[in-house]
Amino acid sequence: MTGDITLLGYGVSAIGPAIAVGLIFAAYINGVARQPEAQGKLQPIAILGFALAEALAIFGLVLFFIAFFV
Amino acid sequence: MTGDITLLGYGVSAIGPAIAVGLIFAAYINGVARQPEAQGKLQPIAILGFALAEALAIFGLVLFFIAFFV
Amino acid sequence: MTGDITLLGYGVSAIGPAIAVGLIFAAYINGVARQPEAQGKLQPIAILGFALAEALAIFGLVLFFIAFFV
């Protein structure tokens, strides 16, 4: 068996944030579809939630480079 | 046991983004089905959410090539 | 323990896209069931979402051949 197991760590760390982005944007789309005039209020909330969830995958990305090259 | 374990990292990193794309497009389809005139407002949100979620899988794809060939 | 671990990478990468296709087509069916005249607007959205989600599994298929034969 060859290959590098390090990438598996990043892969697992990306599962949750991606599902979170999907849930957040699905709720955002549902909200705008129901009340189009609420888009101005919903957009910053969706972007904030996206950033907070995505941060965990970015941590995994940075840690991959640390674990792979250091 | 033979084979290369690196691909498992990409495979796991693709689970979440794919589910996110499914959630986002399901919400988009539901929104258009309920209010067909809202498609113009929903489409950029769906594309934005798709791109942000898919980015995590593209990271995994790039990291696979880094881990496999470097 | 024998066998080739490479295929596990593709197998895992196919989990998410399959669920995404299921979510998208379920929403498509729900939308058409609620508003049959909306099928013309919903069909291209469903096909687009299907293609974007399926791409991640196709990436896994291509990477399997790279990891197995290279």
Image (spheres, coloured by chain):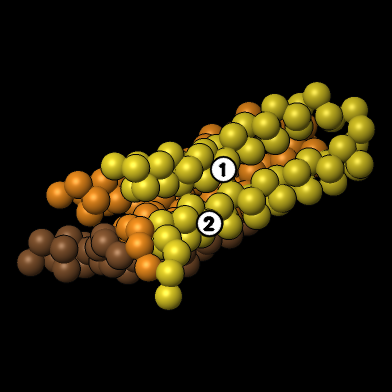
Chain colours: A brown, B orange, C yellow
In the picture, the disc for residue B29 is: none
Report how far apart the C-alphas of labels 2 and 1 lie in the structure.
Answer: 15 Å
Q: Position of residue B69 (x, y in %)?
A: 19, 47
Same chain assignment for discs 2 and 1: yes
Q: Nearer the viewer, residue C17 or A22?
A: C17
* Residue bearing the label numbered 1: C53
Q: Position of residue A61 (x, y in %)?
A: 26, 60
Disc number lying in front (2 or 1)? 2
Do labels 2 and 1 touch, CB within 8 Å?
A: no
* Residue bearing the label numbered 2: C11
Specify whether C40 is left or right of C12.
right
Q: Amino acid at mark 1?
A: Ala
Q: Nearer the viewer, residue C61 or B56?
A: C61
C47 up-or-down from A28: above or below? above
Is residue C15 among the parts visible in the rendering? yes
Helix, strand or loop for disc 1: helix
